[in-house]
Amino acid sequence: MIKGLMYKRIFNWILVLVLVLTISWTSYSYVSAKSQVQTFDAAIALLNNLNIDKNPLLVVSSIFNSLFNLAMLQILVFLVSVVALIFLLWFLFRLYSMEKMNALFDTLTEIYNRRAILLGLKHEIDRAKTFNHKLSVAVVDVDYFKKYNDLNGHIAGDRVLKKVAKTIDKGIRATDMVGRIGGEEFLIIFPETSQQESFKVCERVRKSIADLEFPNMKDMPSGKITISIGVSEFNSMLHSKRNENIIMDADRRLYVAKLAGRNIVK
């Protein structure tokens, strides 16, 4: 899943950060130690030169060279420190960006959360209006989910939601998006897709869910876990005023599917 890949990427960046900071600290320590040693050597050399009768120009030149070498070492220490600090700040920014992206995913199912999927819907509606593209959405509901929860407990119910979400995510196309909009309901966005084309994808997803195995599913009214789906196509005349209108239309079709016996795409 996308969230799993993000965690793996964060872990890799942490390893890189540790490696760079280790190298930077080692370099800094080495250069600092060498600078201190060279400072001590320069001081001794200066005393010796002063005690020995030498050409004043040679003494001045020796002092200048010692100071120059010390200055170069100090500059190198400073640059190493700056590079390490810049990398640390860059890493923190990357970590913040990843955490911000992580806020777009549902913690249980690891697909888009309500906020993210509605932002995606707004974006696709704007594209459909601008380029006159087709657009369809589907509202998915797990049939008799409350009954399964009551019979088996919330932990078992959570496992059902995770497995259903994963199956939907695998069953849709790469260009489609799915998110959890609340409880046992999911929203699928089909960019540049007609209602008829979306029906085919939803029917494939419905069959995939019906084929899944869950504990104690024989106690359910249909003897298995199923989903009902309502599909609606974007219409600029009907849905352009509010983005939620197309969801409401798909929700009405979902209600029809429920009345028709569930485990149906309408």
Image (cartoon, rainbow, N blue to C red):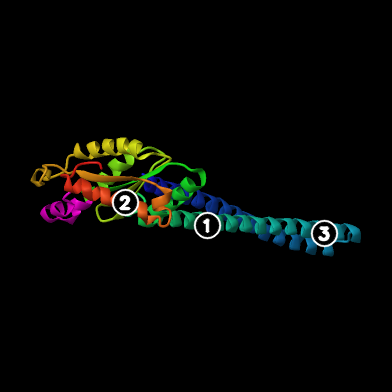
Residue 34 figure quarter: bottom right
Circle nearer the viewer, 3 or 2: 2
* Residue indicated by mark 2: 249
Residue 175 figure quarter: top left
- Boundaries of the magenta span: 143-158
Q: Secondary structure at mark 2?
A: helix
* Residue indicated by mark 1: 93
- Which residue lies at the image location 8% right of the left edge and 46% below the top edge? 219
Q: Distance of mark 3 from mark 2, alpha carbons?
A: 83 Å
Query: Which residue is at the far front?
Result: 237
Taking the magenta stretch, the answer to whether it contains residue 146 is yes
Q: Nearer the viewer, residue 195 or 50?
A: 195
Neighbour tally class for label 3: few under 14, some 14-19, many 20 plus, Cα within 10 Å = few
Give whichever of discs 2 and 1 has the lower sequence position. 1
The circle drawn on residue 64 is 3
Taking the magenta stretch, the answer to whether it contains residue 44 is no
Residue 247 screen position, x and y as percent: 34, 52
The quarter of the rendered structure image containing the C terminus is top left
Residue type beneath disc 1? Phe
Left/right of residue 132 with respect to residue 154 in the rendered view: right
Circle nearer the viewer, 2 or 1: 2
Residue type beneath disc 3? Phe
Q: Can residue 113 be seen in this snapshot?
A: no
Circle nearer the viewer, 3 or 1: 1
Q: Distance of mark 2 from mark 1, alpha carbons?
A: 41 Å
Residue type beneath disc 2? Asp
Neighbour tally class for label 2: few under 14, some 14-19, many 20 plus, Cα within 10 Å = many
